[in-house]
Image (cartoon, rainbow, N blue to C red):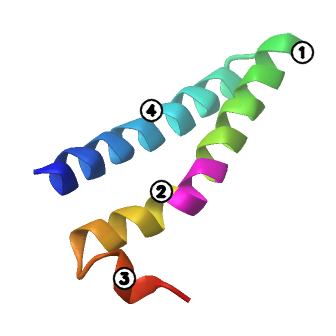
Amino acid sequence: MQQIMETLFDIVYLITVVSLGIIMIRKSKGVKEYLLFGIMAVVLGLGDSFHLVPRMIALCTTGFEDYLV
């Protein structure tokens, strides 16, 4: 149950953060602060995806042990 709920939460989180960031960038209309916060949201979402996507893959497959280096 944890695998399903954590994976769903991560997917919703990543989609929401990146989408809101893109919307903020597109609607900034020259307001530097609005543009900056949009860029920060996109960078946050993309940065979090580097550790959340592999975690989701490990949770939904054979587990963390098979992915240790």
State the mark number for residue 52.
Answer: 2
Q: Earlier in the sequence, mark 3 or mark 4?
A: 4
Q: Earlier in the sequence, mark 2 or mark 3?
A: 2
Q: Amino acid at mark 4?
A: Thr
Could you classify mark 4 by the number of other residues whose Cα lies within 10 Å: few (under 14), some (14-19), or many (20 or more)? some
Query: Alpha-carbon distance for marks 3 and 4?
Result: 30 Å
Q: In this rendered view, identify the residue nearer to me: 67 or 13.
A: 67
Could you classify mark 2 by the number of other residues whose Cα lies within 10 Å: few (under 14), some (14-19), or many (20 or more)? some
Looking at the picture, how far across and down is residue 55, in whole percent? Answer: 41, 64
Q: In this rendered view, identify the residue nearer to me: 62 or 36.
A: 62
Query: Cβ–Cβ below 8 Å for labels 1 and 2?
Result: no
Mark 3 = which residue?
A: 65
| Quadrant of res 10 | top left
- Describe the element under mark 1 as helix, strand or loop: helix
63 to 69, vertically: above or below: above
State the mark number for residue 16.
Answer: 4
Taking 4 as reference, is 30 left or right? Answer: right
Taking 3 as reference, is 30 left or right? Answer: right
Residue displayed at 53% across by 33% down? 17
Residue displayed at 10% across by 51% down? 1
Query: Alpha-carbon distance for marks 1 and 3?
Result: 45 Å
Q: Earlier in the sequence, mark 1 or mark 3?
A: 1
Looking at the picture, how far across and down is residue 36, in whole percent? Answer: 83, 23
Query: Cβ–Cβ below 8 Å for labels 3 and 4?
Result: no
State the mark number for residue 3.
Answer: none
Q: Amino acid at mark 2?
A: Leu
Q: Earlier in the sequence, mark 1 or mark 4?
A: 4
55 to 2, vertically: above or below: below
Query: Alpha-carbon distance for marks 4 and 2?
Result: 14 Å
Q: Amino acid at mark 3?
A: Glu
Query: Which circle, 2 or 3, is nearer the viewer?
Result: 3
* Magenta stretch in the rendered image: 47-51
